[in-house]
Every structure is written in structure tokens, then in C-alpha cells.
Image: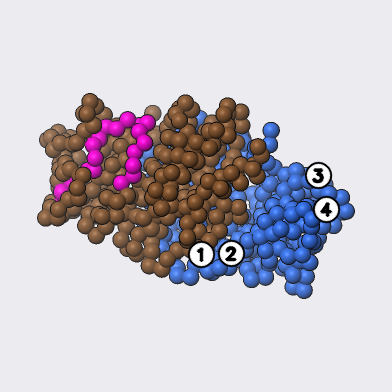
Chain colours: A brown, B blue
Amino acid sequence: MNEIDLIEKIRKLAAKGPRITIGIGDDCAVFRPKPNQDLLFKTDPMIEDVHFKRDLAPEIVGHRALARNLSDIAAMGGDPQFCLVSLSLPAHLVGFERWIDGFYRGLMKLAKRTGMALAGGHLAKADKLFCDVIVCGSVPRGKALLRSGAKAGDALYVSGRLGKSWESRFEPRLALGRSLRGRATSCIDISDGLSLDLFRLCRASKVAAEVDHIPMVRGVTLDRALHGGEDYELLFTMPERLMPPQGTTRIGTIVRGRRHGAVRFQGEPLAPRGHDHFQR
Amino acid sequence: MNEIDLIEKIRKLAAKGPRITIGIGDDCAVFRPKPNQDLLFKTDPMIEDVHFKRDLAPEIVGHRALARNLSDIAAMGGDPQFCLVSLSLPAHLVGFERWIDGFYRGLMKLAKRTGMALAGGHLAKADKLFCDVIVCGSVPRGKALLRSGAKAGDALYVSGRLGKSWESRFEPRLALGRSLRGRATSCIDISDGLSLDLFRLCRASKVAAEVDHIPMVRGVTLDRALHGGEDYELLFTMPERLMPPQGTTRIGTIVRGRRHGAVRFQGEPLAPRGHDHFQR
């Protein structure tokens, strides 16, 4: 199987959205935006031996490679539009074609369910599996949910439960994100652990936070729920008087803080110990 | 230096374009398109030991990582808008900070010269250097140059000279691409060798081609000029009656062909022997 056959195979698997006027097969993908839309862009790669092991089922790799990016689109309140997939594969990979099939099946299943086109991408050879998915979402002009709008006195909420295992096939919180447009004052997705992502939100908003308790997956340690990565839940703030959406839990309150980003958990300082890609 | 410091450093280096309403530092980058624009998207990674060796100067890696994507924007007749950079780095890389500095300096020099913003991206750890640059360009609605419009009787042109060394700091042909909007019937950039890219153009256009002679870099073999990759020149077709732009050379003619994609060079069949990422 050569590159032309492989691309033809992927083209057949790819859904073409109504706004993708040119999809796979030319020098670039062409997207025709609507007027009064702002577009959201995110890229977040998955690398063998960093984010997954080769024995993880390719359907799960494909699902997660897209889902982790969609989680960021959800955190900005966006509607998914299209994705590009840059896939680098070891040439000697045993079960090469089967792996590719599984990967794109996992990815396209989620893409179709969330109304996304696969608009283009790239194939290359590498020593390790490397999947870089790029997603584009949209929001009505000026309506993106930012990290930077939390105010002292706002209530702090989280969706779902924290401490998930990183092999799970999680669902990005797109409907929740959309429902928060015009209501939440700030929002971020928890991809590197609550402690680090709450620190980021507070720093961007120039506030501090008090956390009382957190909803946890059954059987995990408090340490994992506070600092473990890969939860892909939404963390957001709203004025106290507004009703929170279903499936979310109030975990604390935004406060004025001498140090921006300072977080306290049950009265004690909580260090941002989540995942830092470059901590040595 | 941890991840937060690194991102702060990159944020300072990054130019923020007028249409990037949210750049580095939130969950996604936000881009506000103009009405009546079509947007072009391309991703094309550069991987250590596949596309370059670690001893290649980081300024050149940064330049090329962006330039190879801009070459595709040029081939569609686009105006560059913004890029995202997904960079994966070995944690133990000697001269780590210096390498990152050089990489972004090389990339940003070209970005600024071509009017692009660096809107966002991602940093991760990996065993090898892996740079995935994603670019967005724009064209007036419906004006993208495609591979698929060549007609029998059209003249076939190429820019510059073929057979460049792959370490060169080439300039993507953006001004030429723009000047071809509304004039060229088809266009592609030569990234995998003339023989393979002309085959692709002819297949997409359902035509064949006769090539007479090609402009070559001094001192290279005909084999390299016909089949070598990494030229990043534009290959395009125009009706014979139109004047070709300066700096381009007519190399042949588009013909009706029994086999779509069949190319003849000086009367003999020319096989698409250019770079196939998956040929074994």
C-alpha cells in the first residue's frame, strides 16, 4: 500500500462538512466561515510512550486524539467545525493498515457524532506513533468563554467527577460548554489536573480561590483527584445568583487574593502540582 | 525553566495579528475572519531524522517548518493569516533553551515578513524533535487555485529552478501565487519532486502532460531535478494566450491523455518517482 492508496482510503472514511468546500486531496483544505463567527483553534498531539503505549487499541487512540482537542473547544463554548489530522507512523509497524483503520474509525465515530468534518492532514514516517489533531470550532462573534473573566464572589463549579483513568474513552463536554455561553464568567478544561488548571484560571483572572470539596471517581485517592491529569471536565465560574447546569457540582468560591492564582483547599494552600510537561 | 516560563517566553516572541482576538494563553486561539473570505488550512510536520538532523541550525528548522506550509498557501493563491506551532522536544536536549530560542526566532522572522501571527500551539516532551506547524491563509471567496482545473492545450510553467538542496532557506512563492488568482487554471507546489507532483496535478485535472525541458539549479543531475523533493516552487497551468509572470519558465503543455496523470519528458514516459512517504 503506497501513500496515494492510503490517502484514498482516508478520504473515503472522512466526512465532508457543508462548509468544507475543498477537503482531502489538494494543497490545503478550504473552509468557508459564516459571517459574525469567531473561529477557535487548538492543537494537542498524542505521542507514543508519552501519552499512550502502542498496545492501546487504535480506536481509543483515535477517539482520544480528537476528544482532548474537542475538550478545549468545549471550554471556550464552541461548536465543532472541522479537524485536520497529522499522523506519523513507524514504517515497520506490525498490523500497519489495521492500525490506521482502527485509528480513523475511532476518530471519525466521534467526529460524526459531534458534527465535524475531517478536512485534511498529513501522513509521514517516524520512529514512533505521533498523532497531532488540529480542531476548529466556532462561537457567535465575541462569545468565546475565556479563562480571564472570573470575579471575586463568583461560585466555582466542576462537571462530572475527578480522578478518571487516562485510558477512558471520555466524552468532551460540548453541550455543557455551549450552555455556558453568556452565563459563565470564566471556563477552562481540566487536562493537567485540577490544582494546576485552577491556578491557571485564577492567574488569568487575577483572582484567588477557596475550594471546599470535590466530586471524585469512586476508589481514587484525593491526591489523584486534585493533581491527576486527563480528566477533561470543565471548571468554570458563574455569579452566585445563577442556577448551575445539571451534572455540575459547586466546589468553592472565587476570592480576592493577595497572590493571583493562590488556591486554598479546605483552608490549606494547594500547590499547582498538576502535570507540567517540562518539570525535571 | 518550567512550562509556564517557556510559554511566557514564546508569547513574548509571538506577533499578534489584528484578527487574532485571543492568542497564546487560553484553551484555544480565536480568529475573527472577514466576510467573503475562504480560509485555507495546512499542516505538515518536520521530524528529526526524517526531515532534518539535530545538528541543523534551529533557525533553519524554524524557518523551514513554517515555509513548507506557506508554500502550500502560495500554491492555493492565499494570503497568510496565522499559524499554530506544536513542538515536541527531548527533555534532555543539550542547549534546550538555546534551541527553542533559535527555532522561534527563525520561524517568527518569516512569519513577520509574511504578515502572519503566531496564534497558539502546544509544547510536549518526546524522544525526538517534532515540529508540527499549522497555517491558515485566506483567499477571496471561491478564488482558491486548485490542482484540478488544467485543460488540454494549457501551457505548463514552473517558478525558479529545480534541484535545490534540502537545507536551503527557501522563500515560499506567496506573491507569485497571489498573482495567479483568476489567471492560472491549476496550481500545485513541488514538495515531493516534479515527476510526482505533476502526476498529482494531471490526475486531479484528468489530463496528461508533455514536458520539453526544465530549469535546473547549476550542477545538479537531471534525475535530481526531475525526482528530488523539497523544491517548493510552484507548478501551474495557464491558457497559452496569457503572458506568464516574471521568473517562471514554460516547461511544456497539457494534453488530453488516455491515462490521466500520464507525463512524457522529451517524448519518453516519466514515472512519478518523487518522494512517497510510504514506499518500501
Residue depth check, mark 3 versus mark 1: number of the one nearer the observer: 1
Q: Secondary structure at mark 2?
A: loop
Residue B103 x/y as whole percent? 52, 44
Chain designation of label 1: B
Residue located beneath label 3 in the image: B223
Query: As displayed, is residue A155 above or below residue A63?
Result: below
Chain designation of label 4: B
- Residue A158: within the magenta? yes
Residue located beneath label 4 in the image: B264
Q: Earlier in the sequence, mark 1 or mark 4?
A: 1
Q: Earlier in the sequence, mark 4 or mark 2?
A: 2
Residue located beneath label 2 in the image: B144
Measured Cα–Cα span from mark 4 to mark 2: 28 Å
* Closer to us: A25 or A28: A25
Q: Residue at x 67, y 63 (%)?
A: B149
What predominant SS class does the magenta segment belong to? loop
* Marks 4 and 2 share the same chain: yes
